[in-house]
Every structure is written in C-alpha cells, then in structure tokens.
Amino acid sequence: MSKGSTSDDSLRVDRRVAGPAVVLHVAGEIDMSTAPMLAEECDRAIESAPGRLVVDLSDVTFFGSAGLAVLLDASQRGEQAGVQVRLVADGRPVLRSIEIAGVQEMLPVYPDLAGALA
C-alpha cells in the first residue's frame, strides 16, 4: 500500500492504493484557491490508477463550484483513460452542490468508502 499526501492551509489530500483503486481522501475546503491542488492529485491518480479512482470527500467542509468542475473534469479524463471515478460523500456541503448542479448521473456518489470500493 503506497501513501502520499499534499496539503496547504485549508485543504489536505491523502493518497493510498486500496486493491484495484487509488483513494484520495480529501479534507478541508475546496474552493478556487485549493481546486488546482485537487486537480493535480486527481490527474496523478488517474495516470496511476489500476482501474478506479475513489475521491473520498467525507471530510470536506466547503465545496464550491471550482471543486465540482475539477471532479467533472477528472471523471471525463478517467473515462478516456479507462478509469472509473467514484465519490464518497455524506456531508451536506458536497451533496448539496452536486444536487444543485444536477450532475448526480455524471458523478457516482457513495455514502461510504466500502461501497465505493465494492
């Protein structure tokens, strides 16, 4: 199991490999200033993912439209690379943004990590 992490003051991204997936555990705020860091981590994960990228957003406290754009882009790039992108979210900030944008079909959301990895 390989691990890595990136962080700035308001966002932390921990990366690990779990079987057939790369898991990015994201904590903090995803806004215009932190979205590029998340995009970079997603790019790296898609390049190395064995087949699935799971972005765990259960510890995200703020999820702006920039974060949504990053995840939609990652989902498209994953599809082109043969990597399925799944999200884990149970908190209102993330679920509400996805719901308002109406992108539930484009971004599969699971209530827990076990479900997203299954």
Image: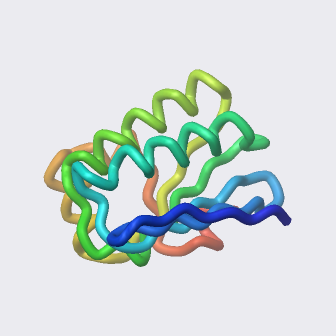
* Residue 73 x/y as whole percent: 40, 33
Q: Residue at x 64, y 25 (%)?
A: 81
Q: Quadrant of residue 113?
A: bottom right
**Quarter of the image with the C terminus in it:** bottom right
Q: Residue at x 33, y 70 (%)?
A: 10
* Residue 97 x/y as whole percent: 20, 58
Among all residues in the image, which is located at the extreme front? 9
Q: Is residue 3 above or below residue 105?
A: below
For the residue pair 18 and 116, the one nearer the viewer reads as 18
For the residue pair 73 and 84, the one nearer the viewer reads as 73
Q: Is residue 101 left or right of residue 20?
A: left
Q: How many marks?
A: 0
Q: Quadrant of residue 31?
A: bottom left
**Quarter of the image with the N terminus in it:** bottom right
Q: Is residue 56 left or right of residue 113?
A: left
Q: Is residue 64 above or below residue 50?
A: below
Q: What is the basis of the colouring in this image?
A: rainbow
Q: Residue at x 43, y 73 (%)?
A: 27
Among all residues in the image, which is located at the extreme left? 100
* Residue 39 x/y as whole percent: 44, 43
Among all residues in the image, which is located at the extreme top? 80
Q: Is residue 46 left or right of residue 95?
A: right
Q: Is residue 106 above or below residue 25?
A: above
